[in-house]
Amino acid sequence: MNVPRRALLRLGVAAAASAALLPRPARGQGGAPRVVVIGGGFAGASCARTLRHTDPRVVVTLVEPSATFTACPFSNAVIAGLRELSAQQFTYDRVVADGITLARTTATAVDAHARSVTLAEGPRLSYDRLVLAPGIDIRWGALTGYDEAAAGQLPHAWRAGEQTLLLRRQLEAMADGGLVVIVAPANPFRCPPGPYERASLIAHYLKTRKPKSKLVILDAKDTFSKQRLFQQAWTELYPGLLEWVPLSKGGQVVSVDAATRTLVTDFGQHKPAVANVIPPQRAGRIAEVAGVADRTGWCPIDPVTFESKLQPGIHVIGDAAIAGAMPKSAFAANSQAKTCAAAVLQLLTGATPSAPKLINTCYSLVAPDYGISVAGVYQPSGGQLADVPGSGGVSPAEAPRATRAAEAVLAEAWFRTITAEVFG
Amino acid sequence: MRRVAAAAIGLGSIAAALVASAEPPAGAASCSGCHPASSRVTSPVPRLLGLDRAAIVRAMQEFRSGQRAGTVMDRIAKGFTDEEVQAIAAWYASQR
């Protein structure tokens, strides 16, 4: 940056008189600064809109191939027949109305040095700052036998849409008395409490519709998010119906055979009527292409700016990022997106972003009227985002049903609020 | 926001105030994950924009001390210092 910050801020005073909000960003070869955002989920769409709302002079392009976004939070309720998929779907009309250019295609390459993005269709995009919000990709083949074809028999339903409906149809088609198995992955993965909320709501479906059936979770780990609260609720709501098999009790599935619907562990085989395989994951593919994913498949970032630790000028937010103590959740993605947008605008003016504080809140439904939550507050510490000591935690272990019902109501309110902010 | 900037020019602390008025203070941007920014959203969670500054500060202090029962705010309020709460409350009070 060759223009001193003080001079920029003086320019900003003149700009303020003509209704602008921020000092004029210096990049963009004399023109307006350009930010490209790849991925139109909770992280990417939030970031693009926050950039435009905060400084309308920034030229923002959002690269997203889908015309419709299908939200994962609450998709477990769709699987359990409590909600329709249409309630999960949002268009980009309001995003475009903010003056954001929507490139309805896939990014195929990133040149961090030339600061450009190659698209599957259309011209190359130059940027001053790039934000990657690609979410997750499935690591096909990481679980032996689980490839894209297998997902047609043993749905993962970990990216909402057709997979969500496939799992729902399989449950609906199953005879009463059938066995349902959920295969839960090792950490890290999208939505840590997700497999257990899903187990709960499928158990609710079985209890009310097919009470002779059984559900087993085969888990590649020995502990999980909100574990005590989930297990307490399972004992109370689904006794004898839902069984959790941890790693230490032989829960790890080592291979699957889609044709025979067989799940193999070190201790034996399971042939359930319905198998939901939640497989190992990594950052969306463009992260690897751009060189911002490390050997774990996820993206190390600076905890103040969300700039990649591997490539300059590229920021990574949402599920793809290694965000320390912050979980891979929609709330975290939205919180990171707004923090990242502010940092990007600061960096474009040559300013130094100050240390942020971020929040996460994740609700899980154990039954339609029984909600539990985990909340956290985070700040940069030792090069990572760390919990603020003494803050956060889960819902109280002992609480009246009214509290659980209140959290179920808050869960739905949260979904309405965040989707209105991101897409409304 | 423009009003804040104009007032700041009068005070002679132009640059700092410009940045301060545009950028939410640490933590503030996360609140709208649950507290609706839009009045069109139906939620039991109150909107913060334009709320009384002292009321926000008091609520956060009471959540933090346990004086006020919360579902998640008791856990979240413990993550913020008095200074941070003051800044967040002032920022939301100035928004519409």
Image: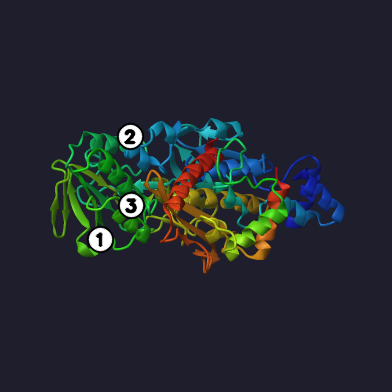
User: Looking at the image, is A153 positioned above or below residue A354?
Assistant: above
| Percent of width and height locating residue B76 | 55, 59
| Percent of width and height locating residue B58 | 67, 59
In 3D space, how far apart are the residues under numbered discs 3 and 2 (Cα atoms)? 21 Å
Disc 2 sits on a residue from what chain?
Answer: A
- Circle 3 sits in a helix, a strand or a loop, which is it? helix
Pointer 2 residue: A162
Pointer 1 residue: A246
Residue type at numbered disc 1: Pro
Quadrant of the frame with the N terminus of chain A: bottom right
Of residues A3 and B44, which is closer to you in this image? B44
A400 displayed left or right of A101:
left
Is the Cβ of the residue at disc 1 closer than 8 Å to that at disc 3?
no
Disc 1 sits on a residue from what chain?
Answer: A
Write the residue at 34% across / 44% down.
Answer: A158
Label 2 CA crowd tier, 10 Å (few <14, some 14–19, many 20+): some
| Percent of width and height locating residue A97 | 59, 31
Label 3 CA crowd tier, 10 Å (few <14, some 14–19, many 20+): many
Quadrant of the frame with the C terminus of chain A: top right
Counting residues from the start of the chain, the first of labels 1 and 3 encountered is 3
Counting residues from the start of the chain, the first of labels 3 and 2 encountered is 2
- Which is in the foreground here, disc 1 or disc 2? 1
Is the Cβ of the residue at disc 3 closer than 8 Å to that at disc 2?
no
Q: Quadrant of residue A220?
A: bottom left
Residue type at numbered disc 2: Glu
Residue type at numbered disc 3: Tyr
- Circle 1 sits in a helix, a strand or a loop, which is it? loop
In 3D space, how far apart are the residues under numbered discs 1 and 2 (Cα atoms)? 29 Å
User: Looking at the image, is A223 positioned above or below residue A204?
Assistant: below
Q: How is the image coloured?
A: rainbow
Q: Which mark is residue A196?
A: 3
